[in-house]
Image (spheres, rainbow, N blue to C red):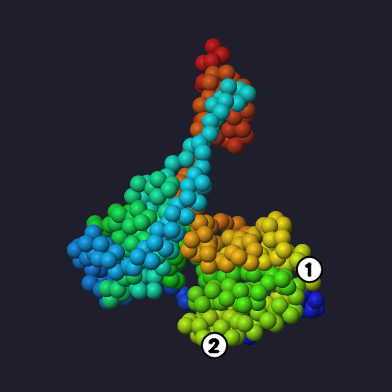
Amino acid sequence: MPHILKTTDADFEAQFQALLGLKREDSADVNQAVAAIIADVRTRGDAAVAELTEKLDQFELTPDTLTFSEEEIAGAEAQVSAEEREALELAAERIRAYHEKQLPQDAEWVDETGAMLGWRWTPVSSAGLYVPGGLASYPSSVLMNAIPAAVAGVDRLVMTVPTPRGEVNPLVLVAAKLAGVKTIYRMGGAQAVAALAYGTDSIAPVDKITGPGNAYVAAAKRQVFGQVGIDMIAGPSEVLIIADKHNDPNFIALDLLSQAEHDESAQAILITNDATLADLVIEAVEAHLKVLTRRDIARASWDKNGAVILVENMGEAAALADDIAAEHLEILVDNPASLAGNIAHAGAIFLGAWTPEAIGDYVGGPNHVLPTARSARFSSGLSVLDFMKRSTIAQMTPAALRAIGSAAAKLAESESLEAHGLSVLARLDQLNS
């Protein structure tokens, strides 16, 4: 059974804080092991990557097998059914169309002093996409990571995917081709992140690394940050559903389980002002847990991390939602847009009963790489902007320098940075001579 909380209970706040404080991330201390792997790759390069790949994935990595050949990718395409291909193409088309609207605009203007100011946006030169490997890997994640990079204009986009025992999901290779990825490496784990960050004889380093992975991958991304950019450190998946009595409890149960089936650390929460709906949803969840293919995983997630919170009104629901700052937020009420306007913190928002979160995972258009573990309070999901950077532009005229230069010199003096001030004053002296 999930945690059951009621805002009318005297100890609700303590229960709610305990829920927020549940330790759902992988607790294994992997930092030391990851640091050793990174150091080994930096020192021995290809040899270290090959040894670790053979040890962890039981796959021999050689110069000939480091990347997938065009023939292998064509062979993967032949294994994909027409229906699967069409679904991938639809997803790619919608994701690309959505992200094209995120492209930022350059700006330039002349202010009242005559100075020209502005900014310009340029893409990172190269990006590496990490994709979890094996037959259970997710082609949707390939599209969600690679398409924003392609839209941003990244010149060199590579992908790395482990192939344990040589296994790979052919859909992953097809998705990479659809998204414009030219080079796909057969490597994973912390060693892949290190190789992308620092480079080896065979692998050119990239400027940014994105994509999900296990605790070792997450730790490696954290440790190489600064050498390269990263998207985020993603934790277990989560969904928060706010619903009133005018909803199908079966819909809600399935939406909750769509997150719980990800892994045992995932979290699914329902907030409602109707006790009858809460009971019916719990019953529906229990019924589905008897037949779901991944029922053992979903059961562990639901029993350990799941919650049903009963509130007196939707104002309370909105306030709680801001505290939870969920990765995915479904709002199933009569006027969902109005309630959403009162909620500031969520990774992605799904409005109305006909917008299941699963649509967002695949074909909705917005990105499904989202902040977890309450980090939606200060960060956003993956976007085109993650593959771009902004350079500011300034050009002073003599008149503009006369207007503002003395203030700059005074501030430099107050900070005891003499050369700073002199670099401005020298120009002012020449202008005034």
Q: Is residue 156 left or right of residue 394?
A: left
Secondary structure beneath disc 1? Answer: loop
Residue 249 seen in the figure: yes
The CA span between labels 1 and 2 is 33 Å
The image quarter containing residue 133 is: bottom left
Looking at the picture, which amino acid does disc 1 mark? Asn
**Residue drawn at (32%, 67%) of the image:** 80
> As displayed, is residue 115 above or below residue 360?
above
Image coordinates of residue 99 in percent, x first then y, are 49, 50
Residue topped by disc 2: 290
- Residue nearest the viewer, comparing 283 with 210: 283
> As displayed, is residue 231 above or below residue 264?
above
Indicate which label's residue lies in the foreground, 1 or 2.
2
**Residue drawn at (60%, 26%) of the image:** 111
Looking at the picture, which amino acid does disc 2 mark? Lys
Mark 1 or mark 2: name the one nearer the start of the chain.
2
Q: Residues within 10 Å of mark 2 (few under 14, many from 20)?
A: few
**Placement of the C terminus among the 4 image quadrants:** top right
Residue extending farthest to the top is 433
**Residue drawn at (39%, 62%) of the image:** 86
Image coordinates of residue 204 in percent, x first then y, are 29, 54
Secondary structure beneath disc 2? Answer: loop
Q: Is residue 297 left or right of residue 202?
A: right
Residue topped by disc 1: 313
Residue 224 seen in the figure: no
Image coordinates of residue 73 in percent, x first then y, are 27, 62
**Residue drawn at (61%, 33%) of the image:** 411
- Residue nearest the viewer, comparing 125 with 150: 150
The image quarter containing residue 74 is: bottom left
Residue extending farthest to the front is 82
**How many callouts does the rendering have?**
2
